[in-house]
Image (cartoon, helix red, strand yellow):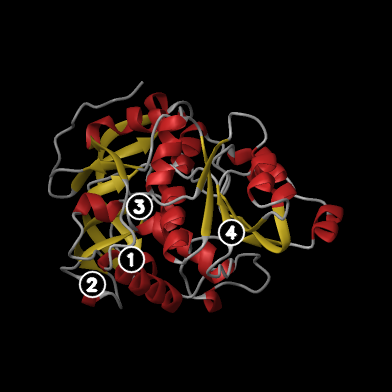
Amino acid sequence: MTTTSEAPTSPSSMRAWRVVRYGRPTEALELTAIAHPLPGPGEILVRSSASVCNYNEVDGCHGRYLTINPPLPYTLGMEFVGEVIAAGEGAQSWVGRRVMGTGTGAVGAHAELVVGPVDMAFDVPPELSDIEGAAFFYPFHLAHLGLHERGQLQPGETVLIHAAAGGVGSAAVQLAVAAGARVIATAGGPEKLDFARGLGADIAIDYRQGSFAEAVLDATDGRGVDVCFDGIGGGVTTESLRCVARNGRHLVIGFAGGIEAEEIPIVNGRTLCFGNFSLVGVILAYSDPALLPPGSGFNPTPPQVGEEVHAHLVELLRAGKIRPVVGRVVPFEQLPEALEQMEARTTMGRIVVQITH
C-alpha cells in the first residue's frame, strides 16, 4: 500500500520515496521522511525540482533488477534536475548551478535532496525548463552514445529503432533523422505510430501486427538495416537479428521487454558467424575507467566523452533538430501510480515527476 502521509520534515530531514517491500509500485513504495544525504568526494548535493520515471525502477519495485539491487529499504530513482546546494571535495565549483544528472549508484533521485557524482552531471541548457531538462539528459545521451559512438551511424544508412514512442526511442529517432539516416520505427498502436512519424520516421511498423522483421526486409528490398537500436531485448532482439544487414550493428541498449533478458544469452555463435554483423553493447555510465579493477567486465565511458556528447546535443537543440519529449508531468505524491502506468505500456515520451518544496 502506498503511504503518502507527510511526516513533518525538519532542517535535517527530507521526503523520499522508499522501496520498503517488493511488489507493484503502489505496494512497494512509501513516502517517508529520512535524513538528508551528504555528498562525498566528487559528488554534489542537489535540491531536486524534478525526477523521471524509468522502467528499471518498476523492476526495482518488484525486486527483479539484479544490476541495481540495494538492500531494503532504499530511495528509488535514477535521474534528477535541480540546483546544486553543496558539494564534496573536488566538486565545489558546481555549487549554485542548475544541473541534470543521476543519483549515486543510480538510486536516490525520487527525493527532495539527491546526491550524485559530477561525472554524471551536466548543466541544464537555459532554453529548457526544469521539466524539459529532466526529459533531456538520459534519453539523448544514451541514444547518442548508441547511434554515434558505438553504432557509428552514417548519413544515408538505414536504422531500425524499437519503442520509438518511448523516452529513449523518441530521442533516437530525432538523432537519427538529424544524422541524415533513413529511420524505420516500431511502436504499438496507431497513436504511437503517428507520433513516431511526427518525429521524422520514414516508416512506422506496428509490432503487434505480425512479424516486424518481414516488414523491415520488405522496406529494405531484402537487405536489412545498417543499425538496429534495441532497448527491448528478449524475443525482439531475436527477431531483429533476422533483418540486420551485412556489416550491420545491432545495439543492445536495454531490456524494457523484460529485465530477465539481461541474464539470458542473447545469440549463439552460428547466428553471429552467418549474419556477418556486429552485436554492440551500450551503457550510459560516465566514469574514469582507471578507477575500476582490471577484469571487472564493466567498461564505463570516460567523462570527457560525456562532455563532448552534451555539447553536441546542446548544439542540435539550439538548431531546432531535437527536443525533449515530455509525455506527462505528475506531482511528487503520484509517483507510484505513474510507474504503474509506465508498466502498463500506456505512456509516450517521458513521465516527469515535479517536486515542490
Identify the residue at the far front of this view.
Answer: 221
Proximity of marks 1 and 2: CB atoms separated by less than 8 Å: yes
Query: Can you identify the residue that label 2 sits on?
Result: 94
Q: Nearer the viewer, mark 2 or mark 4?
A: 4
Residue named by callout 3: 79
- Asked where in the image residue 233 lies, by quadrant, the reply is top right
What residue is shown with label 1?
121
Please provide percent x and percent y for residue 48. Answer: 22, 52
Which numbered mark, 4 or 3, is in the foreground of this view?
Answer: 4
Along the line of sight, the residue nearer the viewer: 63 or 166: 166
**Amino acid type for the residue under numbered disc 2:** Trp
Element under disc 2: helix
Q: Which of the two discs, 2 and 3, labels the residue nearer the N terminus?
A: 3
SS assignment at label 1: strand
Quick check: marks 1 and 3 in contact, CB under 8 Å?
no
Q: Is residue 82 left or right of residue 313?
A: left
Please report whichever mark, 1 or 3, sits nearer to the chain's N-terminal start. Answer: 3
Residue 105 screen position, x and y as percent = 44, 56
